Amino acid sequence: MTELKNLLIRRIESTGPITLADYIAECLMHPEHGYYQTEQVFGSEGDFTTAPEVSQMFGEMIGLWFADRWVKMGRPAAINLVELGPGRGTLMADILRATEPVEDFQDAIAVHFIEASQRLRQEQANRVPLASWHDSLSGVPEGPALIIANEFFDALPIHQFEKREGQWFERMVGSHEGELGFLLGPAGPKLALAQEGLKNAADGSIVEVCPAALSLTGDISEHLNMHGGAALIIDYGYRTPATGDSFQALQRHEYVDAFAEPGAADLTAHVNFPALKKAAEEKGLKGFGATTQGLFLMAIGLGARAQVLASHGDATQQQQILSDLQRLTAPDQMGTLFKVLALQPHELPAPPGF
Ligand code: SAH
């Protein structure tokens, strides 16, 4: 049994079942035993692979998208380039390399990372030594900001509610004979965050809400409203409000039981893009998308970038570039499941890619 499992069972035995959100937060972010603190998360040796780890082209295209936003903003002399959950720092390193030729851009930017894991902060420092680290967005200094979050929102804790005989209950995590599992409890106050339409769902339906994602989107929006800039949120998720259970646990590239070894598996849920867009628009921002990752990347020139890279490579490298391109954009790979949402103030010209 993992140490964390022991701790959680003891906590539940003494104070009662916990919400799924509490469970996810403990599993991912426990300061000692949390997943991001302890595990080799990324790559073929790890539990999952993200777009920047698939190919440098991903970060390069994102970098050029942000450089375009900066130009359209009138090339401010100082701007914060903020990444939420930078993982190994690969995406930012690719952004910085790709934007080197953009005149004055590198002089204007200051890189800020929002990262909870001390272990990952170390890895990020190896790739992007000049960054500053913060626990939350509120640590980022005032001023215009370009904000990127790739596979960050899916790690934020969700609540789940289930309808039984016309009534909503909250799916809680309880313990029984040394094992953790779901049980139903009275619906907590977060049910109010579910979209109205979903509340009329059929018996047996599950709805998910992510208060942390909504409040973070609110914070991003307030920052961009006040100081100007743009944000890009990329994640797997849905584009129309939906019911259903998207909570999943991944370990060594396989789906596993989310309660078997808390802290040892990556826990995620699909991101509710319409809810994020609404939260931003309520704060006066304009949202673009969500579109699919495949359409977005091709619209901003990934095809051309791949051709240039391939023209400098041998046959093996060309094959690799083609397969990376497929992986990032093909509908049966990351192209459709992953969505892209851009947020910016109304006065900034519309961004490319949507
Ligand atoms: N963006 C990277 C990594 C995605 S994994 C990539 O695309 O490869 C999620 C990242 O978010 C990790 O760096 C993890 O430590 C961080 N993270 C998750 N939840 C967090 C939270 N609540 N606060 C700060 N960082 C968090």
Image: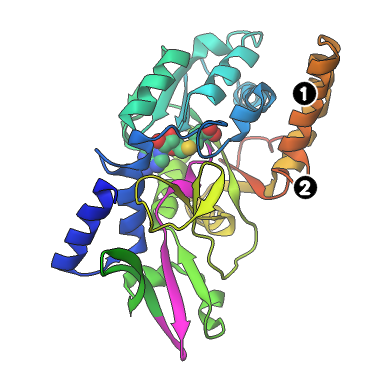
Residue 45 drawn at (x, y percent):
52, 31
Name the quadrant containing residue 13.
Answer: bottom left
Q: How many marks?
A: 2
Query: Which of label 2 and label 1 is nearer to you?
Result: 1
Going from N to C along the chain, the mark reached first, 2 or 1, is 1
Measuring from the top left, give residue 253's x and y in whole percent.
56, 43
Residues drawn in magenta: 150-168
* Residue type of the residue flagged with mark 1: Gln
Looking at this view, is 118 or 346 the one in front?
118
Element assignment for label 1: helix
Q: Quadrant of ligand 1?
A: top left
Circle on res. 331 = 2
Q: Which residue is mark 1?
A: 320
* 271 or 71: nearer the viewer: 271
**Marks 2 and 1 in Cβ contact (< 8 Å):** no
Q: How is the image coloured?
A: rainbow
The C terminus - image quarter:
top right
Report crowding for label 2: few under 14, some 14 to 19, many 20 or more residues within 10 A (C-alpha).
Answer: some
Left or right? Give the position of 105 relative to 182.
Answer: right
Q: Secondary structure at mark 2?
A: loop
Looking at the image, residue 335 sits to the left or right of residue 107; the answer is right
Q: Is residue 353 something one can see in this rendering?
A: no
Question: In the picture provided, is 8 more to the left or to the right than 222?
Answer: left
Queried on whether the Cβ of the residue with tag 2 lies below 8 angstroms from ligand 1, the answer reads: no
Amino acid type, residue under disc 2 in the picture: Pro
- Say which residue appears at 69% left-offset and 24% top-offset: 57
The residue carrying mark 1 has its beta carbon less than 8 Å from ligand 1:
no
Q: Which residue is drawn at the image coordinates 52% and 41% (left, top)?
A: 252
- Residue 116 within the segment the image draws in magenta: no
Residue 157 covered by magenta stretch: yes
